[in-house]
Amino acid sequence: MGAAQAAILGLAVLSLCLSLWAIRADTPPEWRLALPAPVEMTGAPVFETVFDYTPETGQAHSPAIRLTEDGFDLMWFQGSAEAQADVDIHAARFFRGADGWQAGPVHLLLTRNDLGAAMVPRQIVVTLGNTIENEAVPGALYATVASVGGWAMASVADVRMADGRPAQARKLSLSPVLNRSNLVKSPMVEYADGSHALPAYFEMGATHGLLVRLDGHGRVRDTRRIGAARGAGKPIQPMIVALSETRALAFLRDFDPGHRLMITRTEDGGRNWSPARAMAMENPSSPVAALALGNGRILMAVNDAADRPELLRLMLSPDEGASWRVLHEFEGEGALRYPMLRHLPRGEIVLTYSKGTKRGVVAHVFNPAWVAAQ
């Protein structure tokens, strides 16, 4: 054996040994879900509309909530129209003042040019879409980005922020199909060991939800399909609600559209999900927002009238989604869609959604006592 062959063999053996060492040293993710404490629904009811925004021109759509030390931010994409080359992420900050919740000015949070320059490797970002908080990293975001084409060619970018601008960003590796057609919409899922999972979805062809397990550095550790449909239905945009350390359910929009909300369940912390099935609840192919309130209670914001997209209802289930009652109705001119719900540290709840068929953004803050009073 020549020196060159011996060197190649030595490197191969070293590579194999390092791989075996990495496998043995690796700690697989735990699959026990974190559960928040049951929400106390006592005290005086409070409900406040804190934001009602319409840009002078174009669209403002798909609002999300990012928690801050003294309140929260609203984030949404805004431009001439969805998926166009002038769409950026706008935001407004909210904090509690002496007279209640105060809103800061609307400002640019994430631009296509800044994000493209921060990408590793650097690349052009043609348009931006649904953007949510990265709850595992303070201030960080997960953004839906397209470098070519529309949403069918989108990817999910892990965006790390510094001084209000993207410092570094990279696309998550979620799909063998050129890593395309992956998007985000719903808040992250926390596990008992402090790690997080990202609900995402694949929109091209055989659509399905994804549960993306991440490590402490934001690297993808595992992906599990959520609610792949058998027969009719094209489930996307999973909204996950934990019921116990092992049980959770996910509500999904039917992209078909089948005019019914879809649901799937897991009994093992998200490793496996049942096939998505249509619920009795109507839905005009629109995502929902949901929050666990403890003791089997689930709060949901949903479009549940297939022929009335301008109607958004806030509903409560006392029995893990088996039955529902209407708490409150929001009605507007044009569709009210893409809701998001988040708990605030002081126990309040934020609800935001887009109004007027993508023409603006609305946000309300209310407490659990208001929910109990309805």
Image: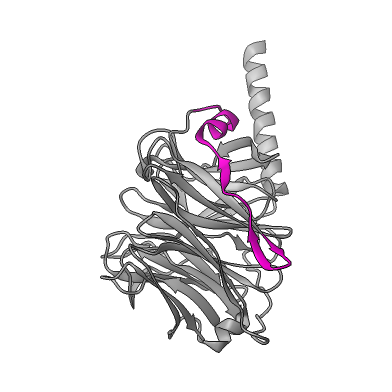
Residue 33: say if magenta: no
State whether residue 130 appears in this view.
no
Residue at 52% in and 77% down: 299
Would you identify the image quadrant in which residue 66 lies? bottom right
Pick the front one: 122 or 373: 373
Depicted 305 relative to depicted 15: above or below: below
Position of 200 compared to 57: left or right? right
Residue at 57% in and 28% down: 117
Residue at 47% in and 58% down: 361
Residue 268 image position (x, y, % from top left): 55, 70
Position of 258 compared to 57: left or right? left
Depicted 68 relative to depicted 245: above or below: above
Position of 56 compared to 116: left or right? left
Would you identify the image quadrant in which residue 147 lies? top left
Residue 115: say if magenta: yes
Depicted 372 relative to depicted 301: above or below: below
Residue 295 image position (x, y, % from top left): 60, 85
Depicted 297 relative to depicted 285: above or below: below
Pick the front one: 64 or 102: 102
Residue at 62% in and 77% down: 367
State whether residue 54 appears in this view.
yes
Residue 59 image position (x, y, % from top left): 40, 49
In what quadrant of the picture does the N terminus appear? top right
Position of 38 compared to 356: left or right? right
Colour convention of the picture: one colour
Q: Total label count?
A: 0
Residue 292 image position (x, y, % from top left): 57, 75
Residues in magenta, as a range = 95-123
